[in-house]
Image: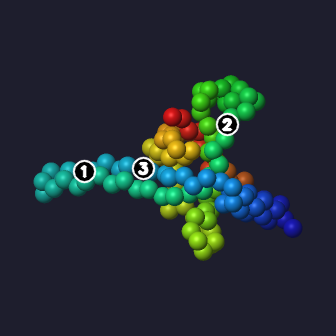
Amino acid sequence: MSLRAEILDGMAEAAAVVAEIGDLVTLEVSTPGGYDPVTGVTTPGEIKTQLARAILDNYNLQSSGTQFADGTQILRDDKKLFLPAMQDVDITGAMKPLDWAPTLETKVTAAGQLWKVISIQTINPTGDLLAYELQVRR
């Protein structure tokens, strides 16, 4: 088995674990409305939401120290949210990609709290997007 195949198999297993033990979270992003001065028409903003399974975890001392040394400050109550790019959120058991990728404007409702996305790291060692690791803050 090639290294790429092993990595993809490992990620499929990780996504299955997240589907089994991860919490259901809501991702929400707002897009502003617009105004067309020619027609005088104002278009309303839009709020997009999607459900996903993810794992909300604490930063350990080593990773938070490394992040701080790199110039990215992690505050005491910050969490990391592991979010597979392929999700199983319906009753069919079929894996499907997220409807849209999280951005820095994304708000996350997890563990009964609203979180703001501070940073996003993509996990794609094979060139295929496998997951996102979000730094979130209340």
**Quadrant position of residue 43:** bottom left
Q: As rendered, which of 136 and 90 lies closer to the eye?
A: 90
Which sits in the foreground, 41 or 106?
Answer: 106
Tell me the element at label 2: strand
Q: Inspect the image, locate mark 1, and give the three-letter code of the amino acid beneath it.
A: Gly
Amino acid type shown at disc 3: Val
Q: Residue 7, can we see it?
A: yes
Number of marks in picture: 3
Q: CA distance from mark 1 to mark 3?
A: 16 Å
Q: Which residue is mark 2?
A: 58
Horizontal and vertical percent position of residue 98: 54, 61
Residue under label 3: 29
In the displayed structure image, the side of residue 59 where residue 98 appears, left or right: left
Q: Quadrant of the N terminus?
A: bottom right
Q: Nearer the viewer, residue 23 or 34?
A: 23
Mark toward the start of the polypeptide (1 vs 2): 1
Q: Residue at x 58, y 64 (%)?
A: 89
Tell us which disc is closer to us: 1 or 3: 3
